[in-house]
Image: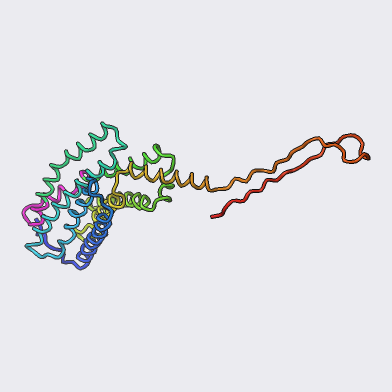
Amino acid sequence: MVEVTKPTDPTGLILEAWAQGYMVGSIIIMICITVSNIKRKILLHKLILLELVLGILHGTFIFNNPPIYGWYLSVTATFLIISWSLHNAVAWIKTRPFLSRRTSIIFIVTVALVQPYWALEIYADFTYFNNINDIYLRTRVFEALFRDPWWVYTTCCLLYSIRTCYHFGFFEFMRISPRFAIMILAMILSIIFTVLDICAVTGTLKEALPIGINPFWKLAFVFRLLADSVILDDFKTALDKLSHYNLSRIEDQERSEPTVPPDVTIAGWRRPETNESAGSWVGVRTEIKVESFPMK
C-alpha cells in the first residue's frame, strides 16, 4: 500500500486546514451557545453538549507530524464516531414524541445494530493512517450508509409532522421563530453536504478535490450539530411552545383591535307639529354612536 502521511501538497494542506479550522471554530461557538441555554435536569441537553465536545477533537490533527500524526488522528476519530452515534440517539429522543411505538423501537434498535461496523471502522482507520493495511479504503465507502439514514428520516419526519399536526405551515413557523428557521436550514444543508461527501468518496469529484482530502463531511457534521444545538428541546416541545405563542399573539391582536358599531337608523311615526300639516307622515331619525378607543 502507498504510505499515508500528512498532506504535503499546498492545495490539499490549505483545504484540510481550512476545513478543520471551520469545524473547530463553529463547534466552539455552538458549545458556548449550548452552555448558556442548558438546563441541568434535562438529559437531552447534556447529551447535545457531550456530542459537541466529542466532535471538536478531530479538528486538530493537522497540527501533528508523523509518527504522532497517525496515532492522534485515529484516537480523535474514535471520539468523532462516538459523537456520530450519539447524534443519532439525540435525533431519536427529539423525534420520539411524533413516532409510534413500533417505529421508535425500530429507530433506536437499528442505531444499535450498526455499532459493529463502527468498531470495524475504528480499527480500519487506525491501521490505515499508521500504514499497517488499507481496509479503510473499502470500509469508508459505506460510512454514510451507516451514519446518515436516521438523520434524513428525522428531517423528513419533522417536516411531515409540522404539516399534519399543526395549523401553521413550516414557513409560518420559520417566519415567527428565527431559531426554527435556522434549524430547518441547517438540516437541509447537512443533507446536501452529505450527498457531496458520498460523491467525493465514490470518486465522482476526484477531479475537483486534492487526493485524500474531503471537506464535505466536516461541513455536513457542523450543520447537523447546529440543528441540535440551536433548539435544545425535543421537536414536539419546541413546536408546541411556538404554536401556543403564535395563537396567543393572534388572540391579543384580535382583542386589541377596536370594533366600531355601525350607524343606527331608527324609523318611527311622528305627529305634525302645526295645524297646517295635513295627516300624519313618516320621519326618519339617525343616531350615530361614537366611542373613543385608546391607541397603542
Residue drawn at the location 87% of the way across and 38% of the way down? 272
Left or right? Give the position of 256 relative to 243.
right
Q: Residue sitting at 14 percent across and 43 percent down?
A: 117
Q: Is residue 276 left or right of residue 43?
A: right
Count of numbered tags: 0
Q: Position of residue 149 (x, y in %)?
A: 26, 42
Report which quarter residue 22 is drawn in.
bottom left
Q: Position of residue 159 (x, y in %)?
A: 36, 42
- When asked about the image quadrant of residue 34, the answer is bottom left
Q: Is residue 126 magenta?
A: yes
Please say which color scheme the image uses: rainbow
Which range of residues does the magenta coloring cover? 125-146
Looking at the picture, tell me which residue is in the foreground, 82 or 218: 82
Location of residue 56 in the rendering, given as x and y in whole percent from the top left corner:
19, 57
Q: Residue shown at 43%/46% (left/top)?
A: 246
Q: Quadrant of the N terminus?
A: bottom left
Residue 252 inside the magenta-drawn segment: no
Residue situated furthest right in the rendering: 276
Q: Residue furthest bottom?
A: 10
Give the side of residue 156 with respect to residue 118, left or right. right
Residue 108 position, x and y percent, is 21, 38
**Nearer-the-camera pick, 171 or 70:** 171
Determine the image quadrant of residue 243. Answer: top left
Q: Eyeballing the image, is 267 above or below 177?
A: above
Closer to the camera, 234 or 197? Answer: 234
